Image (cartoon, grey):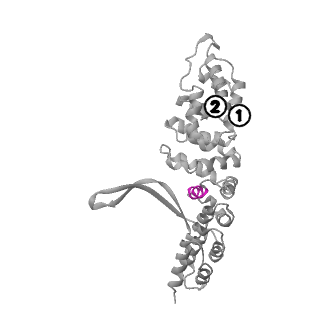
Amino acid sequence: MLPSALEDALLRLRAKLEAGGRLNFEVQHVFDQMAALPPSDVVYLDTQIAAAARLAHQPTGTRILPRLWAVPTHAIQLERTPLLEYLFLCHRDGRLRQAALDQIEGGIPSAFLFAAVCWRLNDWARPVREAAARCARRCFPLTDPAVAASALAAIMIRTRSWGRWTDERDLLDALLARRDVGTALAAIIAERPTGAMARLLRASARTPHLDDHLQHLSFAALQPAVRAAALNMLLAGEAVWAAGRAWRWIDKSMGLLRWAVHYDRRKIEVATDLAALIEQGIADRSAMVRGVALSGAIRHLRGTGIERTHAMRLQDDPSRSVRERVAFILDNPIV
């Protein structure tokens, strides 16, 4: 559901649109309300906003003098009304979405509006996707890093299900190449106590631009799942992320396939002290992180004696999965 204040503002704007009046006051009110919306709801609210403002149809326009229209078309209103372009990102007419995108200049002012431009990169109309790409190249570099990072944190995971875009996705990856945006996104991942921050970290790891933040995340992130994911990437030396879905054979002789998640991976090349990372993980308050650290000890410290020291410390660990790793180390010594 739309917030009541936004719905009321859209209804007032709709009445002015249908009557052909000037829209400046109503558009400013709608803009302020839209800017405050959560970026995570952009796909759902896109249709709700269009319905409330009745942006599916528009007047054909009635000319009463060469330069005067009784009821201006939406295209004319868009040309003469500042900020209307942000509302028309939700218009059901692709030509007006395209025109709105071409009219946006400067940095995007809020995370929701930034996410709305990103959603248009996945538009069902190719000319709109192309206009969105032009808008992104023009405006994303000028956007405040906190705004960009907040929007990316909300939509990065969801973009895996966007099926219409192709090279347009590279524009989001290029955002993470901005050091200020990467730092702001890493801070969000580290500081949010709830939400799928570990999934966000893995989704963001498809590019190397957060690699320098992994060590900090491995001990400072509030969520244990984030600390475990960051530590695992560092100890494994690679990032793995869900890249989509593909058919996978279950039994070729029987012609059985399964529609399964497809994973991509890349190497992580960050200079780290593996022994110190493992020591840090062993002391973590989360069993999830301690388990990752012990797995790292099995991989990197076998035969040094250090892994047995770590295992002895965790013999009475309350976590069964940690105790199983301890038993493997102690029961399988390398002489």
Q: CA distance from mark 2 to mark 1?
A: 13 Å
User: Of all residues shown, which one is farthest toward the left?
Assistant: 253
- Find disc 1 in the rendering and name its residue: 32
Provide the major secondary structure of the magenta segment. helix
- Whether residue 105 is visible to the viewer of this picture, yes or no, is no
The structure residue drawn at horizontal position 50% and vertical position 47%, both measured from the top left corner, is 161
Instruction: Locate residue 267, reporting x and y percent.
Output: 54, 66
Up-down relation of residue 127 to residue 307 (above or below): above
The boundaries of the magenta stretch are: 197-205
Q: Is residue 191 left or right of residue 92?
A: right
Q: Is residue 262 magenta?
A: no
Quadrant of the rendered structure where residue 54 is? top right
Up-down relation of residue 221 to residue 79 (above or below): below
Instruction: Locate residue 94, reporting x and y percent.
Output: 53, 31
Crowd band around label 2 with a 10 angstrom C-alpha radius: few (<14), some (14–19), many (20+)? many
Three-letter amino acid code at the position of disc 2 = Glu
Label whose residue precedes the other's in the sequence (2 or 1): 1
- Find disc 2 in the rendering and name its residue: 85
Instruction: Locate residue 211, reporting x and y percent.
Output: 62, 62
Three-letter amino acid code at the position of disc 1 = Asp
Quadrant of the rendered structure where residue 320 is? bottom right
The structure residue drawn at horizontal position 54% and vertical position 84%, both measured from the top left corner, is 330
